[in-house]
Amino acid sequence: MQIFTSPRELAAQCQEWRAAGEDIALVPTMGYYHAGHEDLMAHARTLAKRLVVSLFVNPTQFGPGEDLEAYPRNTERDTAIAAAHGTDALFMPEPAAMYAPDHATWVEVPELSKGLCGAARPVHFRGVCTVVLKLFLLSQATVAVFGQKDWQQQAILRRMVRDLNVPVRLVTRETVREADGLALSSRNVYLTPEERAQAPAIRQGLLHARQLAEKGETSVSLLREAVLRLWAQRLPLGRLDYLSVVHPESLKPLTDVTGPALMACAVRLGKARLIDNILLRQ
Ligand code: PAF
């Protein structure tokens, strides 16, 4: 595995691979790997001749007062995991190598970035789109793999790729969970034992909503109320950021579940802000 810190050198290597007729799969990450990241890497490894993994805690997707400084890091362990998954190039730039002091160009998909996580994190998706487009350009990836836990992120990136004709195929992998249903996240490390014990209720609430929808409940307000009741009992330490039902592609809020519908949430538990989602109807 080669390790790159220079964007120019990564691009030169990827250009060489593409010129030799080799296709490239990209897994963009912010590190502190768990089994979810490993699933992305293992799947990406099957999709192309070359695997590029980026490990970059992207400062522009963190707003003021968010956890940029505290974001968990373990470069040595992450490097070993990336190598074990057959990564050809691990890209670990310093922020200054990615953003000039007078960086002024941003990529945004405002329509899809206003609601859900975007409501509390107004600059987040602009930072994500900008860095991911940079990674697409540097790696010349033919395919890139993302996780379904970040549903809004992958929906926004799909729209960006479509609107800008970026020649990359996006693949979304199912969320990897603990045995009790908690979605794996690097931020789970912030949970105290008491918070960790309540955290699986997030998934339980979403599953409850899906069961009700499967039984014929179509009212979004009744589905939300049912989830909030369950959380009031099983997740008393949780503070709701949002619980919404939206169209899975347009992310437009729905009032009735009569077609494709995604329930998505963010819950603050102590220092962690945990997100999850479930398709109520495909
Ligand atoms: O999902 C993430 O870890 C990040 O948002 C990403 C896609 C690596 C961009 O920094």
Image (spheres, grey):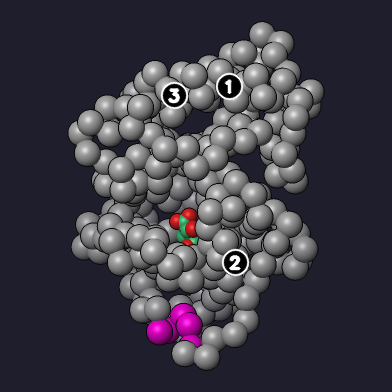
Q: Residue at x 74, y 24 (%)?
A: 257
Residue 53 at x, y = what percent? 43, 62
Mark 2, ligand 1, within 8 Å: the answer is no
| In the image: residue 164, left or right of residue 10 | right
Q: Can you identify the residue that label 3 sits on?
A: 231
Q: Residue at x 61, y 32 (%)?
A: 263
How far is mark 1 from mark 3, CA to CA?
A: 10 Å
Q: Provide the secondary structure element on which disc 3 rests.
A: helix
Badge 1: residue crowd in 10 Å (few <14, some 14–19, many ≥20): few
Above or below 5: residue 272: above
Badge 3: residue crowd in 10 Å (few <14, some 14–19, many ≥20): many
Residue 99 at x, y = what percent? 48, 83
Indicate whether residue 273 is drawn in magenta: no
Above or below 85: residue 177: above
The image quadrant where one finds the N terminus is: bottom left
Q: Provide the secondary structure element on which disc 2 rests.
A: helix
Q: Can you identify the residue that label 1 sits on?
A: 225
Q: Nearer the viewer, residue 222 or 76?
A: 222
Q: Residue at x 45, y 47 (%)?
A: 40
How far is mark 1 from mark 2, CA to CA?
A: 32 Å
- Nearest to N terminus: mark 1 or mark 2: 2
Indicate whether residue 98 is drawn in magenta: yes
| In the image: residue 142, left or right of residue 230 | right
- Nearest to N terminus: mark 1 or mark 3: 1
Q: Which mark is residue 126?
A: 2
Specify the amino acid type for callout 1: Glu
Q: Provide the secondary structure element on which disc 1 rests.
A: helix
Q: Nearer the viewer, residue 61 or 65?
A: 65
Looking at the image, the residue that sits furthest to the top is 215
Q: Which stretch did the figure color magenta?
A: 96-100
Above or below 152: residue 6: below
Main secondary structure of the magenta stretch: helix
